[in-house]
Amino acid sequence: MVEGTLTTIACCGRLLCADSRSQTSWGIITSEKVKKIVVPEDKSAIYAVAGVAALITPLIAWHKAKCPPANVPVSNIEGGWSLFVWPRAGVPELYTSQAPYKDICEVPFAMGSGMEIALGVMDHGGSAHEAVKIAMRRHTGSGGEPYVVDIAKALGLAPLPEQQTYI
């Protein structure tokens, strides 16, 4: 899984959240509106990418084509990419550039360089949104504005119960 120096993406089972900090190909760190989470119009899944945010469109196409090993999107950055997928019908999945095969994820789940902070927050009852906000406050590689997706709403499913928070 990509650990790198930037990004915090967290999933608590009800919410999926990402920070918006990224690094351009020429090394400039920015907190512009970077799309690390995408919900396609068909609402078939929610996708989140760490490592190379610019690869999210080809990674979605690769996933929708059933992940053919001969067509794995490549990255020339150290650490590669990680793709988190929450399919409308199914359980969360993880794919990485090092092992581009489906791995089942348990929630809470986090990826990116702020993942340890995010997991700690969720392990103590915090939501994915709270986890990313705290990682953004405590981790220099995370920042910008958090992007939050309500999983059930995004996939057109029945709402999940509110999560009790302790933070």
Image: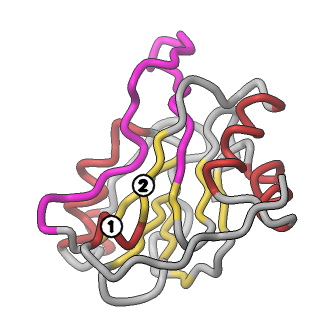
**Which residue is at a point 33% across and 67% down the rendered structure image?**
153
Cα separation, mark 1 vs mark 2, equals: 8 Å
**Quadrant in the rendering for residue 107:** bottom right
**Quadrant in the rendering for residue 55:** top left
Q: Is residue 71 above or below residue 156?
A: above
* Element carrying mark 1: helix
Quadrant where the image shows the N terminus? bottom right
Left or right of residue 141: residue 120:
right
* Element carrying mark 2: strand
| Residue behind mark 2 | 149
Picture disc at residue 153 = 1
**Which residue is at a point 31% across and 51% down the rendered structure image?**
38
Picture disc at residue 17 = none
Q: Which residues are magenta?
A: 17-42
Q: Position of residue 67 (x, y in %)?
A: 29, 74
Q: Amino acid at mark 1?
A: Lys
Is residue 41 rendered magenta in the image?
yes
Q: Are marks 1 and 2 in contact (CB under 8 Å)?
A: yes
Q: Position of residue 13 (x, y in %)?
A: 57, 73
> 39 or 112: which is nearer to us?
39
Q: Position of residue 16 (x, y in %)?
A: 51, 58
Q: Is residue 47 above or below residue 99?
A: above
**Which residue is at a point 83% across and 31% down the rendered structure image?**
138
Q: Amino acid at mark 2?
A: Val
Is residue 113 rendered magenta in the image?
no
